[in-house]
Amino acid sequence: MQSAVNGIAGRISTISVSSTAKVAADAEKLRAAGMDVVDFGAGEPDFPTPDNIKQAAIRALEQNFTKYTAAAGTLELRKAVCERHARDFGTGYRPEECLIGVGGKHVIFSLMQALINPGDEVVIPVPYWVTYQDVVRYAGGQCVFVPTDEQNGFALTAAMIEPHLTPRTKMVIVNSPTNPSGAVLDRGEFEGIFRLTSSRGIYLLTDECYCRFLYDSEPFSIASLPGARETVLVAGSLSKTYAMTGWRIGFGLVPAPVVTAMNKLQSHSTSNPTSISQKAAVEALQGPQDAVSVMLAEYRKRRDYVVGRLRAIPGVTCAEPRGAFYAYPNVSVVIGNRGIGNAHQVAERLLAEEQVAVVPGEAFGTDCHVRISYATSMRELERGLDRFHRFIVRNSEA
Ligand SMILES: Cc1ncc(COP(=O)(O)O)c(C=O)c1O
Protein backbone atom coordinates (compact mmCIF):
# COMPACT_ATOMS: atom_id res chain seq x y z
CA MET A 1 0.00 0.00 0.00
CA GLN A 2 1.31 3.48 -0.93
CA SER A 3 2.27 5.77 1.90
CA ALA A 4 -0.03 8.78 2.30
CA VAL A 5 0.79 12.44 2.81
CA ASN A 6 1.86 13.53 6.32
CA GLY A 7 2.86 10.00 7.16
CA ILE A 8 -0.75 8.87 7.64
CA ALA A 9 -1.06 5.18 6.82
CA GLY A 10 -2.53 4.46 3.40
CA ARG A 11 -5.27 2.22 4.82
CA ILE A 12 -6.82 5.21 6.62
CA SER A 13 -7.50 6.82 3.24
CA THR A 14 -9.82 3.89 2.38
CA ILE A 15 -12.36 5.09 4.97
CA SER A 16 -14.23 8.32 5.83
CA VAL A 17 -15.39 9.82 9.09
CA SER A 18 -18.87 8.55 9.98
CA SER A 19 -21.46 10.93 8.45
CA THR A 20 -23.70 10.59 11.48
CA ALA A 21 -20.83 11.79 13.68
CA LYS A 22 -20.27 14.71 11.28
CA VAL A 23 -23.94 15.77 11.43
CA ALA A 24 -23.79 15.71 15.24
CA ALA A 25 -20.66 17.90 15.18
CA ASP A 26 -22.21 20.42 12.73
CA ALA A 27 -25.38 20.67 14.84
CA GLU A 28 -23.30 21.12 17.98
CA LYS A 29 -21.36 23.99 16.38
CA LEU A 30 -24.61 25.87 15.66
CA ARG A 31 -25.91 25.15 19.15
CA ALA A 32 -22.69 26.46 20.67
CA ALA A 33 -23.23 29.65 18.64
CA GLY A 34 -26.58 30.04 20.40
CA MET A 35 -28.87 28.73 17.62
CA ASP A 36 -32.06 26.79 18.43
CA VAL A 37 -31.31 23.50 16.64
CA VAL A 38 -33.80 20.62 16.30
CA ASP A 39 -31.72 17.47 16.09
CA PHE A 40 -33.12 14.57 14.06
CA GLY A 41 -29.62 13.27 13.40
CA ALA A 42 -28.87 11.31 16.54
CA GLY A 43 -29.42 7.57 16.26
CA GLU A 44 -29.87 7.06 19.97
CA PRO A 45 -32.81 6.68 22.34
CA ASP A 46 -33.86 9.85 24.16
CA PHE A 47 -34.84 7.71 27.18
CA PRO A 48 -32.55 7.44 30.20
CA THR A 49 -30.94 4.07 30.93
CA PRO A 50 -33.45 2.19 33.17
CA ASP A 51 -32.82 2.61 36.87
CA ASN A 52 -32.20 -1.08 37.68
CA ILE A 53 -29.32 -1.04 35.18
CA LYS A 54 -27.80 2.11 36.66
CA GLN A 55 -28.07 0.61 40.15
CA ALA A 56 -26.16 -2.48 39.01
CA ALA A 57 -23.32 -0.23 37.81
CA ILE A 58 -23.29 1.60 41.15
CA ARG A 59 -23.06 -1.75 42.96
CA ALA A 60 -20.16 -2.75 40.68
CA LEU A 61 -18.31 0.41 41.70
CA GLU A 62 -19.05 -0.08 45.37
CA GLN A 63 -17.78 -3.66 45.17
CA ASN A 64 -14.61 -2.47 43.37
CA PHE A 65 -15.43 -4.38 40.21
CA THR A 66 -13.15 -1.93 38.45
CA LYS A 67 -10.26 -4.01 37.11
CA TYR A 68 -9.43 -5.74 33.82
CA THR A 69 -11.70 -8.60 32.85
CA ALA A 70 -11.21 -11.37 30.27
CA ALA A 71 -10.70 -9.75 26.84
CA ALA A 72 -13.82 -11.44 25.43
CA GLY A 73 -15.90 -10.27 28.40
CA THR A 74 -16.80 -11.92 31.70
CA LEU A 75 -18.18 -15.44 31.68
CA GLU A 76 -21.16 -14.09 33.66
CA LEU A 77 -22.05 -11.66 30.85
CA ARG A 78 -21.39 -14.11 28.03
CA LYS A 79 -23.74 -16.58 29.75
CA ALA A 80 -26.34 -13.83 30.21
CA VAL A 81 -26.16 -12.95 26.49
CA CYS A 82 -26.61 -16.61 25.46
CA GLU A 83 -29.53 -17.06 27.88
CA ARG A 84 -31.31 -13.86 26.74
CA HIS A 85 -30.87 -14.84 23.08
CA ALA A 86 -32.18 -18.34 23.84
CA ARG A 87 -35.23 -16.93 25.66
CA ASP A 88 -36.02 -14.32 22.98
CA PHE A 89 -35.31 -16.38 19.88
CA GLY A 90 -34.94 -20.06 20.81
CA THR A 91 -31.23 -20.29 19.95
CA GLY A 92 -28.73 -22.55 21.74
CA TYR A 93 -25.45 -20.63 21.89
CA ARG A 94 -22.75 -21.56 24.40
CA PRO A 95 -20.50 -18.94 26.11
CA GLU A 96 -17.52 -20.03 23.98
CA GLU A 97 -19.50 -18.87 20.94
CA CYS A 98 -19.99 -15.43 22.49
CA LEU A 99 -17.71 -12.41 22.63
CA ILE A 100 -18.44 -9.05 24.27
CA GLY A 101 -17.20 -5.94 22.46
CA VAL A 102 -17.14 -2.20 22.99
CA GLY A 103 -20.53 -1.73 21.31
CA GLY A 104 -22.01 -3.50 18.31
CA LYS A 105 -19.90 -1.31 16.02
CA HIS A 106 -16.69 -2.65 17.53
CA VAL A 107 -17.94 -6.22 17.21
CA ILE A 108 -18.66 -5.68 13.49
CA PHE A 109 -15.24 -4.06 13.01
CA SER A 110 -13.49 -7.02 14.70
CA LEU A 111 -15.56 -9.52 12.69
CA MET A 112 -14.39 -7.94 9.44
CA GLN A 113 -10.78 -7.90 10.62
CA ALA A 114 -11.05 -11.54 11.66
CA LEU A 115 -12.74 -12.85 8.50
CA ILE A 116 -12.16 -10.66 5.45
CA ASN A 117 -9.09 -11.20 3.26
CA PRO A 118 -8.05 -8.69 0.58
CA GLY A 119 -10.30 -9.15 -2.45
CA ASP A 120 -13.11 -10.92 -0.60
CA GLU A 121 -16.55 -9.67 -1.60
CA VAL A 122 -19.16 -8.62 0.94
CA VAL A 123 -22.75 -8.19 -0.22
CA ILE A 124 -24.51 -5.17 1.30
CA PRO A 125 -28.15 -4.25 0.60
CA VAL A 126 -28.86 -0.54 -0.05
CA PRO A 127 -29.77 1.58 1.85
CA TYR A 128 -27.26 0.36 4.43
CA TRP A 129 -25.94 1.45 7.79
CA VAL A 130 -23.08 3.86 7.14
CA THR A 131 -20.36 1.83 8.90
CA TYR A 132 -20.54 -1.42 6.91
CA GLN A 133 -18.78 -0.22 3.79
CA ASP A 134 -15.96 1.46 5.67
CA VAL A 135 -15.17 -1.53 7.87
CA VAL A 136 -15.28 -3.89 4.89
CA ARG A 137 -12.88 -1.63 2.92
CA TYR A 138 -10.61 -1.20 5.92
CA ALA A 139 -10.23 -4.97 6.04
CA GLY A 140 -9.32 -4.98 2.30
CA GLY A 141 -12.69 -6.34 1.15
CA GLN A 142 -14.82 -5.28 -1.82
CA CYS A 143 -18.37 -4.07 -1.20
CA VAL A 144 -21.03 -5.40 -3.56
CA PHE A 145 -24.14 -3.27 -3.24
CA VAL A 146 -27.65 -4.61 -3.83
CA PRO A 147 -30.26 -1.92 -4.46
CA THR A 148 -33.77 -2.28 -3.01
CA ASP A 149 -36.91 -0.55 -4.22
CA GLU A 150 -38.48 2.29 -2.30
CA GLN A 151 -41.86 1.54 -3.92
CA ASN A 152 -41.80 -1.82 -2.09
CA GLY A 153 -40.77 -0.30 1.22
CA PHE A 154 -37.07 -1.13 0.57
CA ALA A 155 -37.98 -4.82 0.98
CA LEU A 156 -35.04 -7.19 0.45
CA THR A 157 -35.57 -10.62 -1.16
CA ALA A 158 -33.41 -13.69 -1.70
CA ALA A 159 -33.85 -13.25 -5.47
CA MET A 160 -32.22 -9.82 -5.24
CA ILE A 161 -29.18 -11.27 -3.42
CA GLU A 162 -28.60 -14.39 -5.57
CA PRO A 163 -27.20 -12.77 -8.75
CA HIS A 164 -24.56 -10.98 -6.66
CA LEU A 165 -23.06 -14.14 -5.16
CA THR A 166 -19.76 -15.15 -6.79
CA PRO A 167 -16.94 -17.56 -5.85
CA ARG A 168 -15.31 -14.57 -4.12
CA THR A 169 -18.31 -13.77 -1.88
CA LYS A 170 -17.27 -14.18 1.75
CA MET A 171 -20.21 -12.61 3.51
CA VAL A 172 -23.71 -11.17 3.12
CA ILE A 173 -24.82 -8.50 5.59
CA VAL A 174 -28.45 -8.23 6.65
CA ASN A 175 -29.78 -5.62 9.06
CA SER A 176 -33.43 -6.08 10.02
CA PRO A 177 -35.02 -3.79 11.13
CA THR A 178 -32.89 -1.62 8.92
CA ASN A 179 -31.13 1.59 9.73
CA PRO A 180 -31.97 3.97 7.92
CA SER A 181 -35.29 2.86 6.33
CA GLY A 182 -36.97 0.88 9.13
CA ALA A 183 -37.59 -1.95 6.62
CA VAL A 184 -38.07 -5.41 8.12
CA LEU A 185 -36.99 -8.50 6.23
CA ASP A 186 -39.81 -10.95 5.58
CA ARG A 187 -39.10 -14.18 7.46
CA GLY A 188 -39.47 -16.39 4.38
CA GLU A 189 -37.05 -14.20 2.44
CA PHE A 190 -34.59 -14.22 5.37
CA GLU A 191 -34.72 -18.02 5.34
CA GLY A 192 -34.22 -17.96 1.57
CA ILE A 193 -31.10 -15.79 1.96
CA PHE A 194 -29.83 -18.17 4.64
CA ARG A 195 -30.28 -21.16 2.29
CA LEU A 196 -28.35 -19.32 -0.43
CA THR A 197 -25.45 -18.47 1.86
CA SER A 198 -25.23 -21.65 3.93
CA SER A 199 -25.32 -23.92 0.88
CA ARG A 200 -22.31 -22.03 -0.56
CA GLY A 201 -20.37 -21.73 2.73
CA ILE A 202 -20.84 -17.93 2.78
CA TYR A 203 -21.14 -16.13 6.11
CA LEU A 204 -24.46 -14.38 6.79
CA LEU A 205 -23.93 -11.48 9.19
CA THR A 206 -27.19 -10.52 10.86
CA ASP A 207 -26.99 -7.16 12.61
CA GLU A 208 -29.66 -7.42 15.32
CA CYS A 209 -29.12 -3.93 16.74
CA TYR A 210 -32.86 -3.03 16.48
CA CYS A 211 -34.26 -6.57 16.85
CA ARG A 212 -36.59 -5.68 19.75
CA PHE A 213 -38.09 -2.63 18.04
CA LEU A 214 -40.66 -4.12 15.66
CA TYR A 215 -44.11 -2.56 15.06
CA ASP A 216 -46.04 -5.32 13.32
CA SER A 217 -44.05 -8.56 13.51
CA GLU A 218 -42.59 -10.86 16.14
CA PRO A 219 -38.87 -10.76 17.05
CA PHE A 220 -37.03 -13.39 15.02
CA SER A 221 -33.39 -14.44 14.69
CA ILE A 222 -32.14 -16.32 11.65
CA ALA A 223 -29.66 -17.95 14.06
CA SER A 224 -32.56 -20.04 15.44
CA LEU A 225 -32.74 -22.17 12.27
CA PRO A 226 -31.22 -25.66 12.48
CA GLY A 227 -27.58 -25.64 11.35
CA ALA A 228 -27.44 -21.84 11.31
CA ARG A 229 -24.68 -21.50 13.89
CA GLU A 230 -21.99 -22.67 11.43
CA THR A 231 -22.34 -19.76 8.98
CA VAL A 232 -24.55 -17.18 10.70
CA LEU A 233 -22.78 -14.39 12.55
CA VAL A 234 -24.97 -12.46 15.02
CA ALA A 235 -23.89 -8.92 15.89
CA GLY A 236 -25.93 -7.64 18.83
CA SER A 237 -26.00 -4.47 20.88
CA LEU A 238 -27.44 -3.28 24.17
CA SER A 239 -27.22 0.35 23.01
CA LYS A 240 -30.70 0.84 21.60
CA THR A 241 -32.63 -1.97 23.31
CA TYR A 242 -31.81 -0.71 26.81
CA ALA A 243 -30.99 2.95 26.06
CA MET A 244 -27.32 2.27 26.82
CA THR A 245 -25.48 3.93 23.92
CA GLY A 246 -22.80 5.46 26.13
CA TRP A 247 -22.04 2.27 28.05
CA ARG A 248 -20.54 0.65 24.95
CA ILE A 249 -21.59 -2.98 25.19
CA GLY A 250 -22.24 -5.17 22.15
CA PHE A 251 -21.82 -8.86 21.49
CA GLY A 252 -21.07 -11.37 18.80
CA LEU A 253 -22.62 -14.85 18.68
CA VAL A 254 -20.38 -16.62 16.20
CA PRO A 255 -18.58 -19.96 15.68
CA ALA A 256 -16.00 -20.62 18.44
CA PRO A 257 -12.95 -20.32 16.09
CA VAL A 258 -14.18 -16.86 15.06
CA VAL A 259 -14.44 -15.91 18.76
CA THR A 260 -10.83 -17.05 19.19
CA ALA A 261 -9.69 -14.86 16.27
CA MET A 262 -11.63 -11.80 17.48
CA ASN A 263 -10.40 -12.37 21.02
CA LYS A 264 -6.79 -12.25 19.79
CA LEU A 265 -7.42 -8.87 18.19
CA GLN A 266 -9.31 -7.54 21.19
CA SER A 267 -6.57 -8.67 23.59
CA HIS A 268 -4.16 -6.28 21.79
CA SER A 269 -6.57 -3.40 21.22
CA THR A 270 -9.29 -2.75 23.80
CA SER A 271 -8.17 -5.40 26.34
CA ASN A 272 -11.77 -5.66 27.52
CA PRO A 273 -15.09 -3.79 27.53
CA THR A 274 -15.47 -1.65 30.67
CA SER A 275 -15.93 -3.84 33.73
CA ILE A 276 -18.67 -1.62 35.23
CA SER A 277 -20.65 -1.60 31.97
CA GLN A 278 -20.43 -5.39 31.84
CA LYS A 279 -22.09 -5.68 35.27
CA ALA A 280 -24.80 -3.23 34.15
CA ALA A 281 -25.30 -5.31 30.98
CA VAL A 282 -25.89 -8.49 33.02
CA GLU A 283 -28.71 -6.69 34.85
CA ALA A 284 -30.12 -5.34 31.56
CA LEU A 285 -30.31 -8.85 30.10
CA GLN A 286 -31.48 -10.69 33.23
CA GLY A 287 -33.66 -8.03 34.89
CA PRO A 288 -37.19 -6.84 34.05
CA GLN A 289 -37.74 -6.13 30.34
CA ASP A 290 -40.72 -3.74 30.72
CA ALA A 291 -38.67 -0.65 29.76
CA VAL A 292 -38.21 -2.11 26.27
CA SER A 293 -41.99 -2.35 25.68
CA VAL A 294 -42.52 1.15 27.07
CA MET A 295 -39.97 2.54 24.59
CA LEU A 296 -41.45 0.54 21.73
CA ALA A 297 -44.98 1.88 22.43
CA GLU A 298 -43.63 5.44 22.44
CA TYR A 299 -41.66 4.90 19.21
CA ARG A 300 -44.78 3.52 17.51
CA LYS A 301 -46.75 6.67 18.44
CA ARG A 302 -43.95 8.85 17.09
CA ARG A 303 -43.55 6.75 13.94
CA ASP A 304 -47.24 7.24 13.12
CA TYR A 305 -46.98 10.98 13.73
CA VAL A 306 -43.77 11.45 11.73
CA VAL A 307 -44.90 9.41 8.73
CA GLY A 308 -48.27 11.24 8.70
CA ARG A 309 -46.55 14.63 8.76
CA LEU A 310 -44.01 13.70 6.08
CA ARG A 311 -46.64 12.31 3.72
CA ALA A 312 -48.65 15.53 4.14
CA ILE A 313 -45.81 17.55 2.58
CA PRO A 314 -46.50 18.01 -1.15
CA GLY A 315 -44.03 16.00 -3.24
CA VAL A 316 -42.51 14.06 -0.31
CA THR A 317 -42.92 10.28 -0.14
CA CYS A 318 -42.03 8.07 2.81
CA ALA A 319 -42.00 4.28 3.03
CA GLU A 320 -43.58 3.00 6.25
CA PRO A 321 -40.88 2.07 8.80
CA ARG A 322 -41.79 -1.33 10.30
CA GLY A 323 -39.10 -1.25 12.96
CA ALA A 324 -36.20 0.75 14.49
CA PHE A 325 -36.74 4.51 15.01
CA TYR A 326 -35.94 6.15 11.69
CA ALA A 327 -37.95 7.51 8.77
CA TYR A 328 -36.32 7.81 5.36
CA PRO A 329 -38.32 10.28 3.28
CA ASN A 330 -37.64 10.92 -0.40
CA VAL A 331 -36.92 14.61 -0.90
CA SER A 332 -36.35 14.60 -4.70
CA VAL A 333 -38.99 17.34 -4.93
CA VAL A 334 -36.41 19.96 -3.90
CA ILE A 335 -33.43 18.45 -5.71
CA GLY A 336 -32.59 20.45 -8.82
CA ASN A 337 -34.09 23.63 -7.37
CA ARG A 338 -32.29 26.66 -6.02
CA GLY A 339 -28.84 25.17 -6.28
CA ILE A 340 -29.74 22.01 -4.34
CA GLY A 341 -28.11 19.14 -6.23
CA ASN A 342 -28.42 16.13 -3.92
CA ALA A 343 -29.51 14.94 -0.48
CA HIS A 344 -26.25 16.12 1.03
CA GLN A 345 -27.10 19.68 0.02
CA VAL A 346 -30.68 19.24 1.27
CA ALA A 347 -29.28 18.42 4.71
CA GLU A 348 -26.80 21.32 4.60
CA ARG A 349 -29.42 23.86 3.56
CA LEU A 350 -32.00 22.53 6.02
CA LEU A 351 -29.52 23.03 8.84
CA ALA A 352 -28.51 26.49 7.63
CA GLU A 353 -32.00 27.77 6.81
CA GLU A 354 -34.17 26.08 9.45
CA GLN A 355 -31.68 24.69 11.99
CA VAL A 356 -32.93 21.12 11.60
CA ALA A 357 -30.27 18.38 11.60
CA VAL A 358 -30.87 15.24 9.49
CA VAL A 359 -28.45 12.74 7.96
CA PRO A 360 -28.17 12.89 4.13
CA GLY A 361 -28.99 9.72 2.18
CA GLU A 362 -25.51 9.54 0.62
CA ALA A 363 -24.34 8.16 3.98
CA PHE A 364 -26.63 5.18 3.38
CA GLY A 365 -26.09 4.76 -0.36
CA THR A 366 -28.96 6.81 -1.88
CA ASP A 367 -28.89 10.44 -2.97
CA CYS A 368 -32.51 11.58 -2.79
CA HIS A 369 -33.44 10.77 0.82
CA VAL A 370 -32.65 12.09 4.27
CA ARG A 371 -32.80 10.13 7.52
CA ILE A 372 -34.94 11.45 10.34
CA SER A 373 -34.44 9.88 13.75
CA TYR A 374 -37.65 9.98 15.80
CA ALA A 375 -35.88 8.97 18.98
CA THR A 376 -36.65 12.42 20.29
CA SER A 377 -39.59 13.99 22.14
CA MET A 378 -42.98 14.70 20.49
CA ARG A 379 -42.41 18.39 21.11
CA GLU A 380 -39.13 18.32 19.16
CA LEU A 381 -40.78 16.28 16.41
CA GLU A 382 -43.58 18.85 16.09
CA ARG A 383 -41.16 21.79 16.01
CA GLY A 384 -38.73 20.13 13.62
CA LEU A 385 -41.39 18.86 11.22
CA ASP A 386 -43.01 22.31 11.06
CA ARG A 387 -39.63 23.65 9.94
CA PHE A 388 -38.99 20.72 7.58
CA HIS A 389 -42.41 21.26 5.94
CA ARG A 390 -41.69 24.96 5.50
CA PHE A 391 -38.26 24.23 4.01
CA ILE A 392 -39.57 21.72 1.46
CA VAL A 393 -42.47 23.93 0.36
CA ARG A 394 -40.20 26.97 0.01
CA ASN A 395 -37.58 25.05 -1.99
CA SER A 396 -40.02 23.11 -4.17
CA GLU A 397 -40.52 26.17 -6.31
CA ALA A 398 -37.87 26.39 -9.02
C1 LIG B 1 -27.54 -0.88 12.26
C2 LIG B 1 -26.65 -0.62 13.40
N1 LIG B 1 -25.82 -1.58 13.80
C3 LIG B 1 -24.97 -1.42 14.83
C4 LIG B 1 -24.92 -0.22 15.52
C5 LIG B 1 -23.92 -0.12 16.61
O1 LIG B 1 -24.36 0.40 17.80
P1 LIG B 1 -23.41 0.35 19.07
O2 LIG B 1 -22.00 0.39 18.61
O3 LIG B 1 -23.79 1.53 19.88
O4 LIG B 1 -23.71 -0.95 19.77
C6 LIG B 1 -25.75 0.84 15.12
C7 LIG B 1 -25.69 2.14 15.78
O5 LIG B 1 -26.20 3.14 15.35
C8 LIG B 1 -26.65 0.63 14.05
O6 LIG B 1 -27.49 1.58 13.64
Image (tube, grey):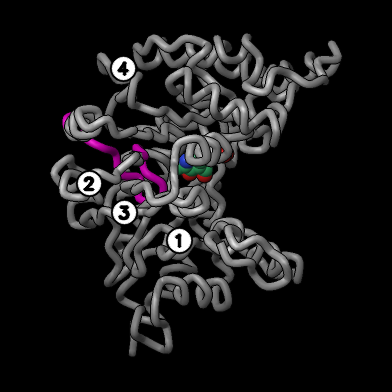
* Mark before the other along the chain sequence, 4 or 2: 2
Residue beneath the point at 58% across and 33% down: 243
Tell me the CA gap for discs 1 and 2. Answer: 26 Å
Q: Main secondary structure of the magenta part?
A: loop
Looking at numbered disc 2 in the image, what kind of residue is underneath it?
A: Thr
247 relative to 374 in the view: left or right: right
The span shown in magenta is 175-188
Tell me the CA gap for discs 4 and 2. Answer: 26 Å
Looking at numbered disc 3 in the image, what kind of residue is underneath it?
A: Val
Q: Is residue 181 one of those drawn in magenta?
A: yes
Indicate the quadrant containing the C terminus: top left, top right, bottom left or bottom right.
bottom left
Q: x, y (%) of residue 273?
A: 68, 28
Q: Are marks 4 and 2 in contact (CB under 8 Å)?
A: no
Tell me the CA gap for discs 2 and 3. Answer: 10 Å
For mark 3, what is the residue?
144
Is label 3 in a helix, a strand or a loop? strand
Q: Are marks 2 and 3 in contact (CB under 8 Å)?
A: no
For mark 2, what is the residue?
166
Numbered disc in front, either 4 or 3: 3
Residue beneath the point at 45% across and 65% down: 360
* Mark before the other along the chain sequence, 1 or 2: 2
